[in-house]
């Protein structure tokens, strides 16, 4: 891990220095140059940087990959035109949800889906459901069709307990032989993960019977619950001889509606189709597929309550993480004569984010195994992926999985996103009750269309009074620190956070993170750090301001902190996706010219942690592979320090086609999904037949801005 050279021949920016090590690197085999490489070689280093093209040493340039010609594209289009009529028949023969569920059950009964209890113990009699079990009990049939084992050791080999996947483990050959008592008996090792969803709580959420006394009390105190009764009228549809014991008033931010039950939250999800209500039996483990409906009539018009038709996972991820002691203020009622006992929002516990390396909450790629990798490489603060409040309140196991926490994450928060004060406050109370977290972050800057269309994320930037209601309701519901993540504004050139920064602190937020781009800007152009500095200087002392955007080296970090001492810290997002060792670089204040072997070891660590988290059976292996490929779609953008004429690399640089210093490095810098799959096969074995992959995210810094 030798440091790269420290000569400081400055160019257009003080943080950009010449790299004198290039003469020591032997060039790869010569390749015929084409017009693209010639034009690149004709430009000076300064011209390349001005055009946001990575100034890679000419010895490593290669011809760009061949792209299909327009004639090929036309012929391909013609070839694909033939099966077009079958598309209409496909739409016509679309299967119903009931039929799809029946097929899933039949597939579970096949020999490839063996009962987990039988797989773990190897004993057919261990399953208490016997013939009623939804999984197969054919051990020999399962062994006959099981894919061959993967090279390497089982990730649970060093655990105190045997592998929980037993016969289904793809590393079965490395399991230690144990007698039957060793498999079934013994005290289990306590899990290193927590924040799972308790089954009983999930059933209450499914049936809308979960109570939120603290959230409802705060909403009522703020006038967001139970007002303006005369403005709305509830028309209840007939139910099957059921009477609802009471009503609760829920605000949706634009008006107040009165809905049935203990919790009929106004949700931002899709409307339910008009079908018969589903009768839910007490004690049933199956999630309701449809919610009871209410129709709200206002000014002569009617609208359905937005309760959402939800499909749930059949298996809950993990068990609930029990808290060692009750949270302060959970069931405490302040006496009427002693209001001084109630904490002011700014008197609550706060977290000092100053000088800490903060890994941003990252959708899809910011999963628990990735965060564990970043913790090893030097991250101080981690945060879970963004979870939608509506889905949490509906008990969706897939959404609750985003809140999982590992014991190595010593300073950990979760990020939630919602459009209305009631959903956010109730989700806050639920998380505070069921999870162990150090802070809760509210996302008010997400630019994704599906989020913005629901009125959440960056759509809130156009509704300052809604922001106020959400922060006040959230901070008054829980005693944990509340942080907020925003962008500069919704439209480019119309920044507005500077006018709200003082109020955000007064409303109850402990910290705010400002991404130096607008929603309209998405990830195009560079982040506006001057505006972030302006907001940080206007913020009250009690409000910590963190900046976010384009931090990609320790020099970027140093520059932001030096330019604005009022900044508490900088949140690192895409920089950590492309090179997670950025945390090491910042702490050691150096450019790490990491080798391809060291990068492969980091990927191996991720795979091992992924198999621990998602499982070592076939399903867990393929889930780990999918998230690995998503990550590789970012890591390929990293340009090794030893190949650059100018260091450090900028986040918006477009690299030309180039060779690495060895075959593995050349494979790692490829932007072809086929090469990413090859890397995954080196770590997780061959992909299944018919496997395809396309990255979910396309957030290159040089992508064209949408909606702008």
Image: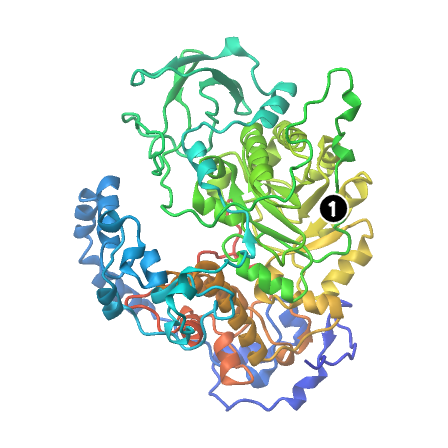
Residue 357 shown left or right of residue 202 in the figure = right
Q: Is residue 646 above or below residue 33?
A: above
Quarter of image, res 466: top right
Query: Quadrant where the N terminus lies?
Result: bottom right
- Which of the two residues, 554 or 220, is positioned nearer the viewer here? 220
Q: x and y percent of residue 592 in the render? A: 68, 75
Q: Residue at x 48, y 60 (%)?
A: 186
- Of residues 615 and 181, which is closer to you in this image? 181
Identify whether 416 is placed above or below 306. below
Any part of residue 405 in sight: yes
Report the residue at 44% width, 21% height from top: 261
In this rendering, position of residue 35 left or right of residue 88: right
Please tell me which residue lies in front, 97 or 184: 184
- Tell me what residue is drawn at x 71 percent, y 33 percent: 508
Q: Which residue, given by chain and number where applicable, does mark 1 sit on?
A: 351
Among the 4 quarters of the image, the one containing residue 19: bottom right
Q: Would residue 650 appear left or right of 197 to someone viewing this image?
A: right
x, y percent for residue 230: 51, 8
Tag count: 1
Q: Residue at x 39, y 72 (%)?
A: 171
Q: Residues within 10 Å of mark 1 (few under 14, many from 20)?
A: some
Left or right, 708 with respect to 283, comes to right
**Quadrant of the rendered image containing residue 372:** bottom right
Q: Position of residue 110 (x, y in %)?
A: 22, 57
- 77 above or below 675? above
Residue 402: x and y in percent read 51, 49
Q: Is residue 519 visible?
A: no
């Amino acid at each position: 891990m030798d440091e790269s050279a420290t000569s400081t021949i400055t160019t257009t920016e003080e943080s950009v220095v010449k790299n004198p090590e290039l003469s020591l690197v032997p060039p790869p085999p010569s390749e015929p140059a084409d017009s693209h490489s010639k034009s690149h070689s004709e430009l000076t280093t300064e011209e390349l940087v001005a055009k946001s093209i990575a100034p890679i040493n000419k010895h490593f340039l290669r011809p760009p990959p061949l792209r299909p010609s327009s004639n090929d594209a036309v012929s391909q289009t013609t070839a694909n035109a033939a099966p077009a009529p079958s598309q209409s028949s496909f739409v016509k023969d679309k299967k119903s949800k009931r039929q799809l569920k029946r097929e899933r059950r039949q597939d579970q009964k096949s020999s490839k889906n063996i009962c987990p209890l039988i797989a773990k113990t190897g004993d057919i009699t261990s399953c208490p459901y016997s013939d009623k079990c939804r999984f197969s009990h054919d051990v020999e049939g399962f062994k006959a069709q099981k894919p061959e084992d993967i090279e390497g050791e089982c990730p649970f080999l060093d655990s105190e307990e045997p592998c929980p996947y037993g016969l289904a483990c793809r590393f079965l050959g490395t399991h230690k032989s144990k007698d039957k008592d060793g498999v079934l008996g013994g005290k289990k090792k306590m899990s290193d993960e927590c924040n799972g969803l308790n089954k009983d709580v999930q059933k209450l959420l499914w049936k809308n019977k979960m109570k939120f006394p603290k959230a409802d009390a705060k909403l009522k105190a703020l006038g967001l619950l139970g007002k303006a009764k005369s403005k709305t009228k509830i028309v209840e549809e007939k139910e099957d001889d059921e009477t609802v014991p009471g009503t609760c008033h829920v605000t949706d931010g634009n008006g107040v509606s009165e809905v049935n039950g203990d919790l009929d939250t106004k949700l931002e999800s899709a409307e339910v189709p008009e079908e018969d209500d589903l009768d839910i039996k007490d004690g049933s483990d199956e999630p309701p597929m449809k919610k009871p409906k209410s129709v709200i009539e206002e000014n002569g018009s009617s609208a359905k309550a937005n309760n959402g038709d939800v499909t749930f996972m059949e298996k809950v991820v993990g068990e609930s993480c029990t808290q060692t002691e009750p949270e302060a203020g959970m069931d405490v009622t302040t006496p009427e004569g002693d209001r001084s006992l109630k904490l002011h929002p700014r008197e609550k516990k706060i977290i000092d984010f100053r000088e800490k390396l903060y890994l941003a909450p990252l959708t899809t790629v910011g999963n628990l195994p990735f965060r564990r990798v970043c913790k090893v490489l030097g991250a101080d603060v981690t945060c879970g992926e963004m979870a939608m409040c509506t889905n949490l309140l509906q008990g969706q196991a897939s959404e609750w999985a985003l809140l999982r926490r590992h014991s190595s994450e010593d300073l950990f928060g979760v990020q939630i996103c919602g459009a209305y004060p009631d959903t956010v406050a109730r989700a806050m109370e639920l998380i505070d009750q069921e999870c162990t977290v150090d802070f809760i972050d509210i996302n008010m800057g997400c630019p994704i269309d599906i989020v913005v269309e629901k009125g959440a994320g960056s759509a809130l930037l156009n509704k300052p009074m809604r922001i106020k209601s959400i922060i006040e309701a959230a901070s008054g519901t829980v005693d944990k620190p509340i942080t907020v993540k925003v962008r500069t504004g919704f439209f480019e050139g119309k920044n507005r956070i500077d006018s709200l920064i003082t109020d955000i602190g007064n409303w109850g937020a402990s910290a705010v993170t400002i991404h130096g781009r607008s929603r309209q800007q998405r990830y195009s152009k560079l982040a506006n750090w001057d505006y972030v500095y302006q907001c940080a200087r206007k913020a009250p002392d009690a409000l910590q301001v963190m900046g976010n955007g384009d931090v990609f080296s320790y020099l970027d970090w140093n520059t932001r902190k030096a330019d604005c001492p009022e900044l508490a810290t900088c949140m690192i997002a895409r920089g950590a996706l492309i090179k997670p060792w950025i945390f090491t670089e910042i702490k050691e204040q150096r450019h790490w010219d990491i080798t391809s072997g060291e990068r492969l070891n980091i990927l191996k660590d991720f795979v091992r942690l992924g198999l621990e988290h998602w499982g070592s059976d076939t399903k867990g292996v393929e889930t780990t592979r999918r998230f690995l490929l998503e990550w590789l779609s970012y890591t390929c953008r990293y340009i090794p320090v030893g190949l650059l004429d100018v260091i450090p690399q900028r986040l918006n640089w477009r690299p030309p086609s180039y060779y690495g210093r060895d075959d593995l490095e050349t494979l790692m810098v490829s932007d072809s999904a086929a090469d990413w799959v090859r890397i995954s096969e080196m770590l997780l074995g061959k992909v299944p037949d018919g496997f395809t992959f396309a990255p979910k995210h396309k957030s290159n810094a040089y992508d064209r801005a949408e909606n702008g």
